[in-house]
Amino acid sequence: IHTHGYKSDILGVWAARKASIKCVVTPHGFENTKDLKLRLFIWLGCQAMRFADSVAPLSKQLCEDVQRYGINGDQLKYIQNGVDLMEVEAQRSVTPIFQKSNGEKWIGFIGQMISRKNIDDILDIFDTLSNKYSGLKLKLLGDGESRARLERKAQNLMSAGNIEFLGFRDDRLNYLQSFDLFVMTSTLEGIPRCLMETMAMGVPVAAYDIAGIDQLITHNQTGLLAELNDKNDLQEHWEQLLFNEEKVKHITENARQFVFENYSARRMSEKYFVLFSELLMK
């Protein structure tokens, strides 16, 4: 059994023990929420993780995090996250299906709508820029416990008519291909799959400089980073990437090269194959 997420870790480790089979847990990040129920699930998940046969975090920072829960030695196996970049390449080879009005620019986000994604900052920055520039649209793909509250907040903004909540989409790569800018304001991350896909697609990225994201984005080389919670600086980065074509070309070319060299799904799957094989031999 290979589990991903607090609830699945709890159930997966318990089921593996009952069935006398091997269990691998892959942490994706530890939610820094104030919600007591979610904090309880996180704590229980971390306790369950200690009884897995192997714990394989997606990033170096997560490797350090899990050691606080007693995960170390042979039980800890770092397998860097990866993504099927061929799927992205296939999308790049076709004509975008979405047609924009003249001068229109799409700012996009893809991911869970949960507290650590800090999407409030995206809405705040977009509202400021939307009042400054015409033709900006915000497309938010994903779902989660924060979505209803975020939709209510968006309805009260001056830019409400330019914000669209699209939920989870099977055609997310069609949208990603049409984004002029991909934005993240997370306060906590592993190594985000959506960010790897964005870089491979050739879409510029602006985000907060936090662990996990800093393994993909080097400021002024593969994207633009602002200090955590510095919305003014991040807003300036949005503006640069929306209106400075020369800078965008430099950054997106570097980002594509970097992600293809370091974060392919093939490399990740080979690492998991070795881990699974070793566990089955024990």
Image (tube, rainbow, N blue to C red):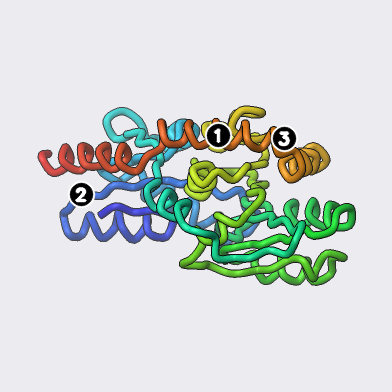
Q: Name the one closer to the observer, 268 or 63.
A: 268
Circle 3 or circle 2, nearest the eye: 3
At mark 1, the secondary structure is helix
Place of residue 185 in the rendered image (x, y in percent of width and height, measured from the top left): 67, 47
- Locate residue 278 relative to residue 49 in the image: left or right: left
Place of residue 119 in the rendered image (x, y in percent of width and height, measured from the top left): 69, 55
Place of residue 62 in the rendered image (x, y in percent of width and height, measured from the top left): 47, 37
Which numbered dot is residue 253? 1
In this view, the residue farthest toward the left is 281
Q: Mark 3 highlights which residue?
A: 226
Name the quadrant of the N terminus. Answer: bottom left
| Badge 3 or badge 2: first in the primary sequence | 2
Whether residue 9 appears in this view of the structure is yes
| Badge 1 or badge 2: first in the primary sequence | 2
At mark 2, the secondary structure is loop
Three-letter amino acid code at the position of disc 1: Glu
- Locate residue 199 relative to residue 140 in the image: left or right: left
> Which residue corresponds to the image point at 49% horizontal and 41% vertical from the top-left?
191
The quadrant in which residue 161 appears is bottom right
The quadrant in which residue 105 appears is bottom right
Whether residue 29 appears in this view of the structure is no
Q: Is residue 221 above or below residue 56?
A: above
